[in-house]
Amino acid sequence: MKNILLMLLLSSFIIACGDKTKKPNIIYVLADQWRAEALGSNGNPNVITPNLDKLASEGISFTNAISTSPVCTPYRSMMLTGRYPLKNGMFMNDVSLDPDSQSFGKLYKNEGYSTAYIGKWHVDGKGRSAFIPKERRQGFDYWKVLECSHSYNNSNYWGNDDELHSWEGYDAAAQTKDAIAFIEAQTENKSPFCLILSWGPPHAPYKTAPKEFQKLYENMDIQLRPNVPVELAENTKAMLKGYYAHCSALDSYIKQLQDAIKRNNLEDNTIFVFTSDHGDLINSHTERKKQRIYEESAKVPFIIKYPALLGKQGRKSDFLLNTLDILPTMLGMSSIKAPEGLDGEDISDVILGEKEDNRKAALVACIQPFGQWKRTLGGKEFRGVITKRYTYAKDLSGEWLFFDNVEDPYQLNNLVGNPSFKSVAENLEELLDKELDRLDDDFLPGASYLETWGHKVDSTGTVPYVN
């Protein structure tokens, strides 16, 4: 009898140890241009996102997730490599990431993971519809990708067979279906998997979501943020109806993904992330699109669910999560050693409450304005920091923007030059200087970095591209 009890205890111990050492699966869901406040769980009174709200109730939702350089290519290169854009030249859209980079897919593949990337890529820089050969896929083996497209219905992609195909219907729906097929195929594979699903919406055009989701907002009286000018109110409401329709469509696909991992008994041991590369101003501050430090542009949703490590009791974290932290943190939570030279921090211990949150600021930078924020539209180089209370930014001439986000949550009162806030501004400038020193950023004119990296631009300062 004693021997039987001993064997049972030993078996239980082995099973428990096995559970703890089993490598987690990764599902990283990336939307394009989804601003942080556009979630029901973040207090938005208009947008209908019940499934993301549920995800937030079961995971950790970061209320201060900051896009370090809020535009497509710079964010994506930082997410993939953990390197600041001045370290690899990826500070503009439509430039090329070094194929020899140590990056997300390669690092997981080296640990025995099956790797997959589905959707928008935007770090190849050889043309937005061009074929991307295997040596430039950064370690992702399962591959259904287009460099960049904002035509969301029947859009094209390059497949594993190196042939050009088309997604049927609304591409985010078809991409999600394909992602689920990949997930289900992994249940027969003993190795863990790493999947990045990269959707194009809710980036404009805003009126191309499936009709069933557009109908949700047809008769809704959209409540606008107070920083939208009155003269732009009707135009903004029309844009937001389309924007939110995209959001609600994508929200429904979150449910499909969650149902799939539950159905295949993968929920507990899967790190599931939902986030975006940057936000969208949509007429706040009379501005559109991104690249700015305003909250609508620089703050993004970031929800992480990993029941085996974090449980399923949802909570909010006000940690100042920077884009550069994503790769080291994902590796840390997967018990994978991060390579030397990353510019972010593994914040796993902070998430678990095992380490104090000592971060005082998160950097936001525009190294070279271009495209939708070209200089004729007010674009400029800037560096800034966001803290848990303030937003502070300098351009090449000096202080540019300074907001108290607690007293002024819609950033309507620029405090630059206000003598009552002089000491606060000096402290924020010191925090900014420390971040720039840490990242070897001399804050030079954009032209200097264009010359250093050999990027050729047109008269607007934009890298020309072919669709």
Image: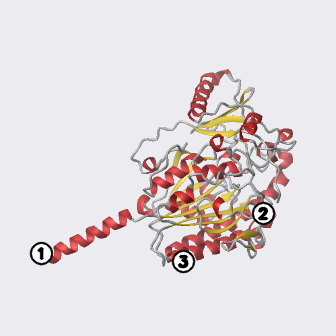
Q: Secondary structure at mark 2?
A: loop
Which of marks 2 and 1 precedes in the sequence? 1
Q: Do the numbered discs 2 and 3 sit on residues whose CB atoms are within 8 Å?
A: no
Among the 4 quarters of the image, the one containing residue 238: bottom right
Q: Secondary structure at mark 3?
A: helix
**Category of crowding for the residue at label 2, using alpha-carbon neighbours closer than 10 angstroms: few (below 14), some (14–19), many (at least 20):** some
Q: Is residue 260 left or right of residue 163?
A: left
Residue 221 visible here: no
Instruction: Tell me the residue that label 3 is attached to.
Output: 185
The relative height of residue 156 versus residue 236 in the rendered view (above or below) is below
- Quadrant of the snapshot with the N terminus: bottom left
The CA span between labels 2 and 3 is: 28 Å
Q: Residue at x 47, y 38 (%)?
A: 358
Query: Considering depth in this image, is 268 or 453 the residue closer to the camera?
Result: 453
Report the label total: 3
Q: Amino acid at mark 1?
A: Lys
| C-alpha distance separating marks 1 and 2 | 68 Å
The image shows residue 3 at horizontal and vertical percentages of: 13, 76
Residue contact at pointers 1 and 2, CB within 8 angstroms: no
Residue behind mark 1: 2
Could you tell me which residue is drawn at 86 percent across and 39 percent down?
Answer: 376
- The image shows residue 299 at horizontal and vertical percentages of 64, 47
Q: Which residue type carries mark 2?
A: Ser
Residue at the disc numbered 2: 129
Figure quadrant of the C terminus: bottom right
**Badge 3 amino acid:** Ala
Q: Position of residue 295 (x, y in %)?
A: 67, 44
Q: Residue at 41%, 63% (x, y): give it.
A: 308
- Quadrant in which residue 382 is drawn: top right
